Amino acid sequence: MGHQGLFWIGVKLFNEGEFFEAHELWEEIWRESEEPDRSFYQGLIQIAVALAHLERGNVIGFHRLIDRAEEHLAEFPPAFGGIRLAELRRQVTELAQWVAAVESNPQPQPEEDRCRPNNGMDDNKLSILSLMSGVKITIEEEAPDQT
């Protein structure tokens, strides 16, 4: 399968919350790419891995990779590679700001209550997971064929 096909499969996986799997596909493309595409793919890979870290509770890894991704993607136009890159960056920035706010003002953790519908998961973690599920790659209207 060509790079274009792998890229769009990665987008689909990312949008389904399969961040690590998306990163694996994009890494294949990244290895064989030249600039500026190489930086574009590296930024997407870092966002995907950052979200995988956040899923696992590694907030430090999340913030480090988001910062690196921003360094790679900062000079790209709002739309690049068939996606609305500015929209993705905005979503990730908002998530990072929210996570930082939660870190700086943590609420006391209630004792685990197995009767709670969230099975003892604290509200902050539920909110983070909800916000993560809202991070999606939006396709440009004029995007190339995605197969």
Image (cartoon, rainbow, N blue to C red):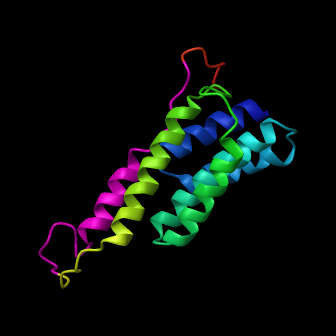
- Main SS of the magenta segment? loop
Residue furthest out toward the bottom: 111
Could you say which is closer to the camera, residue 138 or residue 116?
Answer: 138
Q: Is residue 63 above or below residue 14?
A: below
Residue 80 in the image: state x and y as whole percent: 66, 28
Would you identify the image quadrant in which residue 41 lies? Answer: top right
Q: Work out which quarter of the rendered image holds the N terminus and state it.
A: top right
User: What residue is rendered at 58% in x and 69% in y?
Assistant: 61
Would you identify the image quadrant in which residue 104 lies? Answer: bottom left
Write the start and end of the magenta stretch as one range.
113-140
Residue 127 in the image: state x and y as whole percent: 29, 58
User: What residue is rendered at 29% in x and 74% in y?
Assistant: 106
User: What residue is rendered at 42% in x and 63% in y?
Assistant: 100
Could you say which is closer to the camera, residue 126 or residue 109?
Answer: 109
Is 129 covered by the magenta stretch?
Answer: yes
- The answer to whether residue 141 is left or right of residue 130 is right
Is 44 covered by the magenta stretch?
Answer: no
Residue 35 in the image: state x and y as whole percent: 85, 38
Q: Is residue 22 above or below residue 36?
A: below
Q: Tell me how many marks there are.
A: 0
Could you say which is closer to the camera, residue 133 or residue 2?
Answer: 133
Q: Is residue 128 above or below residue 110?
A: above
User: What residue is rendered at 61% in x and 56% in y?
Assistant: 67
Residue 103 in the image: state x and y as whole percent: 38, 70
Residue furthest out toward the top: 142
Q: Work out which quarter of the rendered image holds the C terminus and state it.
A: top right
Could you say which is closer to the camera, residue 36 or residue 143?
Answer: 36
